[in-house]
Amino acid sequence: MNDAAQAPLPRVSDRNFYIFTAVVSAAALAFLAYILLIRRGGPVGGVDLRFLPAVNASLNALAAVFLASGWVAIRRKARRVHQYLMVSAFASSALFLVCYLAYHFVHGDTRYAGGGVLKAVYLLILASHVLLSIFVVPGALLSFYFAWRNAFERHKKVTRWLAPIWLYVSVTGVVIFFMLRGSLPTSP
């Protein structure tokens, strides 16, 4: 790459992007709250999306692999590979979010059927997963924005805390899927 391609873009106000990020993040949280707390699922024209939790776990696992691989790529100074991997992680997580919302819109929430210590562990993992997931959408948008603006110092500041959070959320999404499925009674 030449120096012109790596130079930061002229300084402009980031205010509009911050507003956009806040609106998108708030809209996603509001829609999720509506689906889980108010609507609580229900029949939608005979649509059956019970296959989606396995798809969602796969998308979370894929995002985790892309994130870890992207971290390795940037450590090795493979910037282009890092970019592709991060876009792939974002695409996997975005597709997960769409599928997650669709599933819960149709089927509502799935409760952990087990009890005892495992239920306590499940609820602890679930709570940390949910709380930390709130930061992934705005953090990822900010990270991409700063990279696009060639503001790599700002990009690094965001990704220092975003990367472990996003990776944790992706991995615990898979753990939650298996814990939840393991707690459900098996069909004869």
Image (cartoon, grey):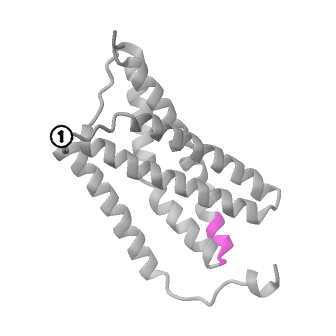
At label 1, counting other C-alpha atoms closer than 10 Å, the crowd grade (few under 14, some 14-19, many 20 or more) is few
Relative to 24, 60 lies left or right = right
Q: Is residue 55 above or below residue 122?
A: below
Q: Is residue 92 above or below residue 103?
A: below
Query: Of 139 and 108, which appears nearest the observer?
Result: 108
Q: Secondary structure at mark 1?
A: loop
Q: Is residue 78 above or below residue 187?
A: below
Q: Give the magenta range.
A: 150-156
- Residue that appears at 58% across and 53% down: 89
Query: Is residue 152 highlighted in magenta?
Result: yes
- Residue 15 on image: x %, y %: 44, 81
Query: Is residue 59 highlighted in magenta?
Result: no
Query: Of 129 and 47, which appears nearest the observer?
Result: 47
Query: Of 106 and 109, which appears nearest the observer?
Result: 106
The picture quadrant where one finds residue 62 is top right
The picture quadrant where one finds residue 185 is top left
What is the three-letter code of the residue carrying label 1?
Pro
Q: Is residue 132 above or below residue 79?
A: above
Relative to 46, 153 lies left or right = right
- Residue 11 on image: x %, y %: 59, 88
Relative to 139, 31 lies left or right = left
- Residue that appears at 65% across and 76% down: 151
The secondary structure making up most of the magenta span is: helix
Please give the residue where the numbered disc 1 appears in the rendered image.
Answer: 43
- Residue 123 on image: x %, y %: 38, 29
The picture quadrant where one finds residue 112 is top left
* Image quadrant containing the N terminus: bottom right
